[in-house]
Image (cartoon, rainbow, N blue to C red):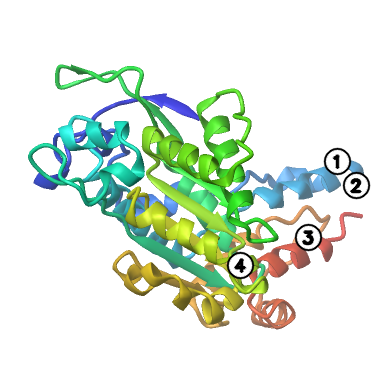
Amino acid sequence: MAVNAKYHQADLPEYRGNPLIEALPPLMSREDVMLALSNFPEINANERELSTEVREQYVDRIDAFRCPQGTFFDCYKAIVRLLRTGYTTRNPLDIHTVRFLHYSVEGSLGEALGDGFHRPRAGTFSITGISGVGKSTMLEQVLGHFPQIIDHNVYQGHDLTPLRQVVWLKINCPPNSKARDLTEILLTAIDDALGLERTIPPSRTGTLLRLIAQKIKSAFIGVLVIDEMQRLTRTNGDEQLINFLHDIVDTLGVPLVFCGNPEFEDKMRQRLRFARRAETAGFIRLNPLAYQTTDWQSFIQYLWRYQWTNVYTPLNDELNIKMHKLSKGNLAIAQRLFVVMMPTY
């Protein structure tokens, strides 16, 4: 979704005068973030008196139910930090950035550019957890708070048109973990986000890598999210793909967010040398929720309201414990279990 830029003066002096940062949504408090990322579908007690056929359709509303955990705010803070720090060295009004955009990657990094150096600055952030704990859901909800595309206009007297800022992109690691496949996926994602006709990938890998580097630079990508990173583990990690990921961070200055299951955390994180410094942006390990946690109790109490049965069954300790035991604290399983066990006859 594209929006026209609305600029807000940044709190920190080092962020001021940068339209890429000052066009981002203002920072929110924990309470506002949790409210913004929640989704509690409507339910009316009178709906329980409707026919079975109609009530069965109402049950589908539970698919849209979202009750954020405390880690959602941690994820939000990490994304905010990555965006702001990553954009500090990519100010489109800075002469070094302008030159960086017009030089090839090989000819610009590490060499003097006019009266100084262009030093991209980017961090990384990892999220791991078993299937169903809500990794992708959390990421998609947090990313959805930010516009994906910002169209810039006049900023402090500077006409920035036709600058289009890609705030975030989310892609999946290819099943075979090959660098070429990842670059083709990324090329398509950039074109789709900007509403452009899809670029036909060059046949030569070197040409493709130079093309994607230029696309990444000119799109001013704020953060690139790569899901399903455990696929890299299963192929023992394609060295060319790993080097490409290093270049995105170290050479192009684009922050990365990795999302995968514990297999990725155990076997691959240490092969990514920038992952060892990623803790500056944070690391989240999502686990099934323990019964006594506030997150589980809030989740089950909000979810329990969504009953379209003839007779409402109040939540008690016995039912609560049973739900937790059957789902093992996995929210995706608990939510699906709640739907399946609800008779509407």
Q: How many marks?
A: 4
Which residue is pictured at 39% across the width and 60% down the height? Answer: 73
Q: For the residue carrying disc 4, how many other residues have a C-alpha within 10 Å: few (<14), some (14-19), or many (20+)?
A: many
Distance of label 3 from label 2 (alpha carbons): 15 Å
Q: Secondary structure at mark 2?
A: helix
Does residue 209 appear anywhere in the picture? yes
Camera-side mark, 3 or 4: 4
Which residue is pictured at 16% across the width and 40% down the height? Answer: 113
Query: What amino acid does circle 4 point to?
Result: Leu
Displayed quadrant of residue 277? bottom left
User: Is 286 on the left or on the right of 233, as rendered?
Assistant: left
- Does 111 appear above or below 298? above
Displayed quadrant of residue 196? top right
Query: What amino acid does circle 2 point to?
Result: Thr
Camera-side mark, 3 or 1: 3
- Dot 3 or dot 1: first in sequence order is 1
Query: What amino acid does circle 3 point to?
Result: Val
- Dot 3 or dot 2: first in sequence order is 2
Q: Which residue is mark 1?
A: 54
Q: Which residue is mark 3?
A: 339
Which residue is pictured at 29% across the width and 42% down the height? Answer: 107
Does residue 67 appear anywhere in the picture? no
Distance of label 2 from label 1 (alpha carbons): 5 Å
- Dot 4 or dot 1: first in sequence order is 1
Q: Secondary structure at mark 4?
A: helix
- Dot 3 or dot 4: first in sequence order is 4
Q: Which residue is mark 2?
A: 52
Camera-side mark, 2 or 4: 4
Q: For the residue carrying disc 3, how many other residues have a C-alpha within 10 Å: few (<14), some (14-19), or many (20+)?
A: some
Circle 4/circle 1 CB separation < 8 Å: no
Query: What amino acid does circle 1 point to?
Result: Val
